[in-house]
Amino acid sequence: MTAAPALRPLAAVAPTAPARTAPAATPNLWAPATPSIELTVVIPFYNCGPVIARTIREVSGVLTAAGIGHEIIAVNDGSTDESAAFVAELPGVRLIDNRTNSGKGNALHQGFAAAQGAWVGFIDSDGDIAAHHLITYLELARTGDHSAVYADKRHARSSSTASKSRKFISITYSSLVTGMFLLPVKDTQTGCKIFRRDVIAQLLPHLREQRFAFDLEFFVAAKAAGYRDMRSAPVDVDTAANGSTVTTNSIVRTLRDTFGILRRHRSGHYRQAAA
């Protein structure tokens, strides 16, 4: 993992002015959760312009309306546009501002390590998944004390406006990894998940993926560590507003990284997480 970059502070109640630049914070994940923060939401972003601000406002608004104590950690994955400036103007947001692009997985590593909530989750920055899903998933997590609750596009009650080609790629990849790792999870990649704090704290040091395969690696490590209580949940994915960020290069890279996970899996790397 890279050295921790600048981190902006968040109070339990949003301040009236934007947070100012602060020294890098000591990771909080392996300390006790902050009592006033039930849910940490990490939002990694890269070159998404004003969309990131709309996503953060939506997340903050629905969680506040639901009375859920929360913090939002936005992680800039080396954007070259004005995305980080839009985030910096928002009150009550902790901004991890990376200057180089290292990948979604790296951004999630950094955000999770700084989390203060009893539950730790993330949602994609592009607005394809509405923020109200976080409330539903948190309620499911509380009720069953699940180790993880994850968005599942293949759930019977899910819907998606994605193109046929994108759906084909998603189903093909899901089928591939289910067969390779014998996972009980049908959809590893959809960008909304909530984890129990102790689970992500146990597994994160063993996760190596820096890009899109991070999600898959979590589930592989969780299975190796003996976690079986991961709950799928329906999701509505609306790609109409912002389109797809999936490129040929990202598909090729994810496939390559998937086989890297397979090598580590076969070598017994993830069984160390059970110790």
Image: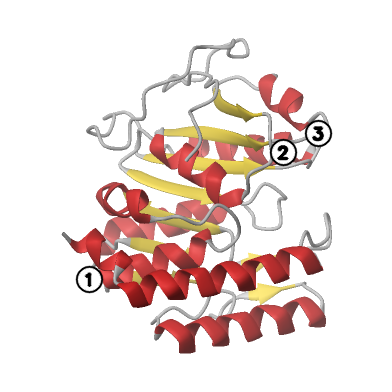
Q: Give the image quarter of residue 168.
A: bottom right
Q: CA distance from mark 3 to mark 2?
A: 14 Å
Q: Amino acid at mark 3?
A: Thr
Which quarter of the figure is the C terminus placed in?
A: bottom left
**How many neighbours does mark 3 have within 10 angstroms: few (below 14), some (14-19), or many (20 or more)?**
some
Q: Is 52 drawn above or below residue 229 in the view shown? A: above
The answer to which quarter of the image holds residue 58 is top right
Query: Which numbered disc, 2 or 1, marks the residue that appears first in the sequence?
Result: 2
The furthest residue to the left: 275
SS assignment at label 2: helix
Counting from the top left corner in percent of width and height, residue 29 is at 32, 37
User: Dot 2: within a 10 Å radius of its alpha carbon, few (fewer than 14), some, or many (20 or more) residues?
Assistant: many
Q: Amino acid at mark 1?
A: Gly
Question: Residue 139, how many percent across, how many down?
Answer: 37, 56
Viewer-proximal residue among 31 and 24:
24
The one of 4 and 13 positioned closer to us in this rendering:
4
Residue under label 1: 226
Q: Which residue is mark 2?
A: 52
Secondary element under disc 1, as helix, strand or loop, is: loop
Distance of mark 3 from mark 1, alpha carbons? Answer: 41 Å
Residue 156 appears in the picture as rendered: no
Q: Which mark is residue 80?
A: 3
- Of mark 3 and mark 1, the one earlier in the sequence is 3
Q: Which amino acid, mark 2?
A: Ile
